[in-house]
Amino acid sequence: MITAAAQEREHYLNASYGIKSWLLTKDHKRIGLLYLATVTLFFFLGGAFATLIRIELLTPQGDLVSSDTYNKLFTMHGVAMVFFFLIPSIPATLGNFFLPMMIGARDLAFPRINLLSWYLLVIGGLFSLAAMLAGGVDTGWTFYTPLSTTYSNTWVVLTAVGIFIAGFSSILTGLNFIVTVHRMRAPGMTWFRMPLFVWSNYATSLIQVLGTPVLAVTIVLLFCERVFHIGIFDPKLGGDPVLFQHMFWFYSHPAVYIMVLPGMGVISEVVSVFSRKPVFGYGFVAFSSVAIAVLGFLVWGHHLFVSTQSVYAGLIFSFLSYFVAIPSAIKVFNWTATLYKGSISFATPMLYVFGFIGLFTIGGLTGLFVASLGFDVHVTDTYFVVAHFHYIMVGGTIMAYLAGIHYWWPKMTGRMYPEGWAKLSALVIFLGFNLTFFPQFILGYLGMPRRYHVYPPEFQVLHVLSTAGASVLAVGYLMPMVYFIWSLRYGAVAGANPWGASGLEWTVSSPPPAHNFEETPVVTTDAYDYSKVMGEVIEVG
Amino acid sequence: MGKLQLFPESASTFAPDVDHLTLFLIAVSVFFTVLIFAAIFVFAIKYRRRSEHELPRVTHTGLALEIAWSVIPFGLTMVMFTWGASIYFKESRPPSNAMQIYVVGKQWMWKVQHMEGRREINELHVPMGRPVRLTMTSEDVIHSFYMPAFRVKMDVVPGKYGEMWFEPTKTGTFHLFCAEYCGTKHSGMIGSIYVMEPQDYQNWLSGGGAQDSMAQRGERLFQDLACSNCHKTDATGRCPNLVGLFGKKVQLSDGRTINADEQYIRESILQPTAKVVAGYQPIMPTFQGLVTEEGVLQLVEYIKSIGPKPATGAVEPEHSNAGSTPRDR
């Protein structure tokens, strides 16, 4: 990994060697890479479950696996992807690595707590992994009661304990980010000079700190109910099963924004660099992140429109849900406007941005569908919802994650990835994604329920299309895995600032020095001022 | 493999309502998707980087523009909200002449009881052109009663009565799905809805030999469980007289006043000490485990039948004069 050119210079990768220097590191950059490795493992584990699900659904009969196994597959797919991949993905890897650098800090505010966060994710992951190896869990990642508390005889508690522990990883990371942004900005780095990636991670951290404890409480109650039968959720003991849904979604709806807000931050960075223009409407984009974080806490009840909650609760939650749509729409319009009269490069990160904006637009607009009560009654718990949230989580978050990894790869590793292969993979992922999930909108509207192992034959054509798309998508995801590893050894050596970006992280060499900055930077301009990084200039636009 | 279908069958009065809303939602979405895609495409081509030395002029934020693209979409979303809400509101208000059918979900089957006594499993027979109200509960986990061709769905929750209604507009056989994941054989918890001409439905109801109505079964259960020992039909019993109870206000011993509906009767059978009538002692034992959810529903029907008038005005419950609803008279 070490090249002749980089050999003389000390950086965070060669500052020390050996397994201990990684497992006991307090360097936010190394911890970022530890997270990268961890969440990548869970991504491929969750992906393997998804592959089996899609193969099973090729035929209407249950012929590959039994119903019990199928139910475990979609449960473990959800658990691995949501709690151990999507939630930590961008903040814990790219956020950890770049948030301190982008505000001119030497590290996060609490480096030891940062390392502890990673250990908590790993320990939580091991618990849930142990549950999977021991025989799995079959409640769905939503753990609805009383199925999870009374009726399922799979590894519910072990899985839930894993999620409980991983939750503290998320809380501590959020806390660390909040304190870092408040206390460790470089001189001159005012709030409104911060890159938008920092704003979006800050907003995400607020949700992590305020929302995740509710998940922890919910899991404790689930545990007590299952083990001690205390009667919180079981109607036979005087409990209320719908109460669980309120508590679960009070965290898990905001968690959607934990997953997608950091992605929006990546998009803001990348769209600016590759248009060589400041993000249009910076203040609106920044505040829309905070607005999403706040409003996200007020809409959980839209998951319960047919749960027998009161009609008036349904009306209020539907009404409030539309308020979240507006800040999301503001972002999409401002990103698009950023392109206007820009100098647009088609480098791979930008292709992922185009993909993100397209897919997130469809995901967001179909969110307006399901927020509409009369429509949702028909499609809730069908494939329409499955398609909708995959457009947000996979079409949104993962596209943004890949945009971010490609964009910052030269900085993290000092190497360029192969541009041709990367462009091809972006295209393959975009096409594969749409072929996988677009048919599911139609399936859902036709009435195909979620979590069905066996289904009526008239749905088969669309399921076959979806599975075909999934195989394309799988190839698309494996390609970066291969060429990123390849690039560590054979990739072209990256300079300090291969994209002509304006952020502080690009002012230091690649890979960055162990302590980021030789001397504390002083910030004198707004974010995204490209004039300062360019020599000879041709004005356009 | 079957043919490719793009739009579901439409077989209830709600189906066209929902489909029209869907078309509106699709139209708005297509407009914005095309707008965004076209803008990206045009900008990306037109303003592509021609030289590494290009530096675009900074465009400043237009406040009017920001307000416009916040307010216009918000206006559209309020149309979506109002339209969807009006359908939902209608779906939550069964007409008073709706015929009553009871559903109990359990892992992994649907059990249906008609007022007149006919019972079925994983099938639901209903007449065309008449509103049908389902009162539903579960014996175990949460299920969800979903009929895509009617565009309606409602969770079936243990411990409480959920309600939904629909009016079929087309005869035929339609899917019934469990939509809330309920364990191993969730995808096997499916059935068929048979929408029949009203006359055929009458014939079907009276088929299968002479049967007791739900209220009659409830009355028998009332005797078998010895409820009548305490709940006497005059003031001499140790427990409240249940004649004329249903739909009335009841004064409780803790001072509250509640409405004697299905949910209250069910709770009083299974958790008798939860709400004790003023002036009585909490001496009734629980019947949890002694009576099934279907049995509870029969008892509810019986108590409704000895009331002066069903509060919901749903059906004439007293006798088994099959399927006659107020609309027929």
Image (cartoon, coloured by chain):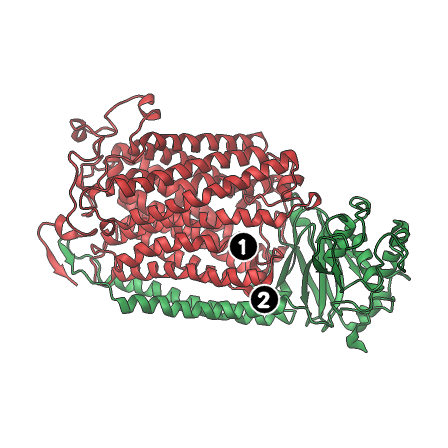
Chain colours: A red, B green
Q: Nearer the viewer, residue B157 or B268?
A: B268
Q: Which chain carries label 2?
A: B
A154 above or below B244? above
Q: Which residue is drawn at 28% across and 46% down?
A: A420
Displayed quadrant of residue A101: top left
Circle 2/circle 1 CB separation < 8 Å: no
Mark 2 vs mark 1, CA separation in Å:
15 Å
Q: Which amino acid does label 1 sit on?
A: His
Question: Quick one: SS at disc 2?
Answer: helix
Q: Residue at x 64, y 72 (%)?
A: B13
Residue B77: image location, x then y, percent:
44, 67
Residue A66 appears in the picture as rendered: no
For the N terminus of chain A, the image quarter is: top left
Q: Are marks 2 and 1 on the same chain?
A: no
Q: Nearer the viewer, residue B212 or A55?
A: B212
Residue A488: image location, x then y, percent:
28, 33
Q: In the rendered image, which residue does mark 2 sit on?
A: B88
Give the numbered dot on residue A268: none
Residue B295: image location, x then y, percent:
81, 52
Q: In the rendered image, which residue does mark 1 sit on?
A: A303
